[in-house]
Amino acid sequence: MESKYLSAEALASKVASYIKDQLVLVLKEQAFCSLGLSGGRSPTPLFHELAKILPVDIVRRLNIFLVDERHVPFTSPDSNFKLIKENFINRLVVSPKNFIYPVTFLSQEDAANQYQKDLKEYAPFDILVLGLGEDGHTASLFPGEEYLAKDGKMIIAPPLIHHGHKRISLNYKAILDAHLAIFYIPGQNKKEILEKVCQNGDNFPAQRIISRHPKVIIFREKI
């Protein structure tokens, strides 16, 4: 695990530059790069900055997908698809050839099964951008559902409702198998949970990822 502390003003732009550099490195070795993005309000400035600096030759070689999604219509304000499309995909210099996301007009279980089929050819993934909830969750992996770590599926449909919605998410193994996991954590409200998840252990889903992933980097604001 590596942690980088950046000012609030510089965080989004510096992380965007880091992601771009990592994409360049991957694309020197292979024809396409798979990039998984998380939703929520926190990464919106990062999406804006990243869209500004990605050139056409990189965008055309990206397979962009959602780390997780709420089981809501595409038009819902709670949809990660809607957020990422409006704040990233639509701002790119050209449309990426591949933007993969769960088809949430299906049932939760069917959407998860279809998403697994759609993503299978891209695994193991190259780069994942993850967030952190104040309860220690990441992706749609929440405390109290540790049994999901034993589910062998790459994509899961957790049965519990969290923050008002059922979810579709990458499972632990899919995240741990990714070549690089980037945690983007703006704001000062995550200080306490960050200290906890950066310790070895299994108390929180993010902690399980951070303590086990072979290449994880955490970007956070200076305190």
Image (tube, helix red, strand yellow):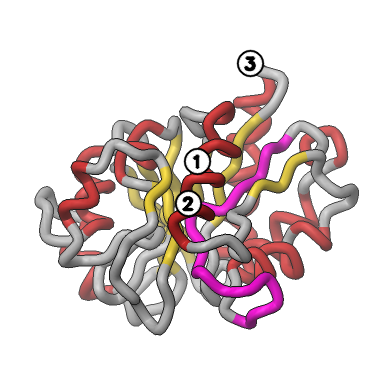
* Tag 1 residue: 116
Q: Is residue 59 magenta?
A: no
Question: Could you tell me which residue is drawn at 52 percent across and 59 percent down?
Answer: 38
Left or right of residue 209, residue 129 in this image:
right
- Is the residue marked by circle 2 packed among few (<14), some (14-19), or many (20+) residues within 10 Å? many
Left or right of residue 144, residue 45 in this image:
right
Question: Distance of mark 2 from mark 1, alpha carbons?
Answer: 6 Å
Question: Could you tell me which residue is drawn at 61 percent across and 48 percent down?
Answer: 65
Closer to the N terminus: mark 1 or mark 3? 3
* Tag 3 residue: 29
Question: Could you tell me which residue is drawn at 22 percent across and 39 percent down?
Answer: 212
**Which residue in the rendered view is the most extreme toward the top?**
29
Label 2 sits on what residue type? Ala
Helix, strand or loop under label 1: helix
Q: Quadrant of residue 62?
A: top right
Provide the residue span drawn in magenta.
62-77
Q: Quadrant of residue 14?
A: bottom right
Q: Quadrant of the C terminus?
A: bottom left
Question: Distance of mark 2 from mark 3, alpha carbons?
Answer: 31 Å
Helix, strand or loop under label 3: helix
Asked if 162 appears above or below 58 in the picture, the reply is: below
Label 1 sits on what residue type? Gln
User: Residue 222's x, y, as percent?
Assistant: 39, 69
Circles 2 and 1, Cβ within 8 Å, touching? The answer is yes
| Closer-to-camera residue (146/158) | 158
User: Residue 206's x, y, as percent?
Assistant: 27, 56
Nearer the camera: disc 1 or disc 3: 1
Label 3 sits on what residue type? Glu
* Tag 2 residue: 112
Question: Distance of mark 1 from mark 3, alpha carbons?
Answer: 25 Å
Asked if 32 appears above or below 90 in the picture, the reply is: above
